Image: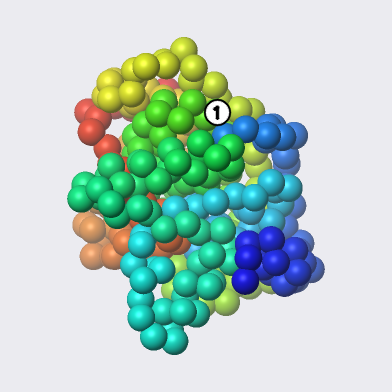
Amino acid sequence: MGYWLAKFVFLGPLLRLLWRPWAEGRENIPADGPVIIASNHLSFCDSFFMPIVIRRKVTFLAKAEYFTTPGLKGRLTRRFMYAVGMVPIDRGDSDAARAALTTGVRVLGEGTLLGIYPEGTRSPDGRLYRGKTGVARLALESGAVVVPCAMINTDVVQPQGRIFPKLRPRPGVRFGKPLDFSRYEGMSGDRFVERSMTDEIMYELMQLSGQEYVDQYAAKVKKSQGKDAAFGSPGAADVREIGDRAPKSRAS
């Protein structure tokens, strides 16, 4: 089952009919070329509601294990992942961070939209947490613009631990203006540049979403609370793999 079949023949119309998601700022998404959609992450359903309000196909990265599990369960999982626009991370590189980055750059090199969650995991309490610099590294190595994207109400529609989303309130998606980081061309690997770029993206997400910003990594907060930071949408896990080599600073 292909992505477009799932989106337009089954999943898309069903989700739009039952949940009626609203969207603002869709005109900010370039009509062509590579684009990174950098979103806050409130709920598992973010990866479903955001793509169906965009005309272009949105791709997310997913761990290769989702596509290599044997047996009937593995086949069903693999078909589902492909159907909702997930692509496996190329594990040809022994370094997981480099493998995720390489796959992301390859996908963007095909002129597609790549969805990514800079926080690396779902927010544990609805606040916006410090972004991982993997999103900046992807932008620098691919030359793609970054469109900030704020998910609204999805944490109420599908709180953590709930399998099926509630029908109310209506989930929303808000897109900001594209961020062009071409002024930093050739500076990939510079920790201060990548941190500055990431903080700029997170600031835009804070403005779009209205969330309170917390200058800590969500994964560390979850760990301190005894929660599993790896439990989330497939695309969220892979921003952690791309990594964060930067010193601590406050978004401004």
Figure check: 121 above or below 250: below
Q: Locate the C terminus and report the quarter of the image it occupies.
A: top left
Q: Which residue: 40% across, 29% down?
A: 141
Depth order, front residue of 178/158: 178
Residue placed furthest toward the top:
183
* Count of numbered circles in the view: 1
Q: Which residue: 34% across, 47% down?
A: 100
Where does residue 209 sit, x and y in percent of width and height?
A: 57, 41
Where does residue 127 sit, x and y in percent of width and height?
A: 44, 47
On the picture, is 49 further left or further right than 118? right
Q: Which residue is mark 1?
A: 145
Residue placed furthest toward the front:
92
Q: Amino acid at mark 1?
A: Val
Depth order, front residue of 65/43: 65
Figure check: 101 above or below 220: above
On the picture, is 97 further left or further right than 89? left
Secondary structure of the residue carrying tag 1 is strand
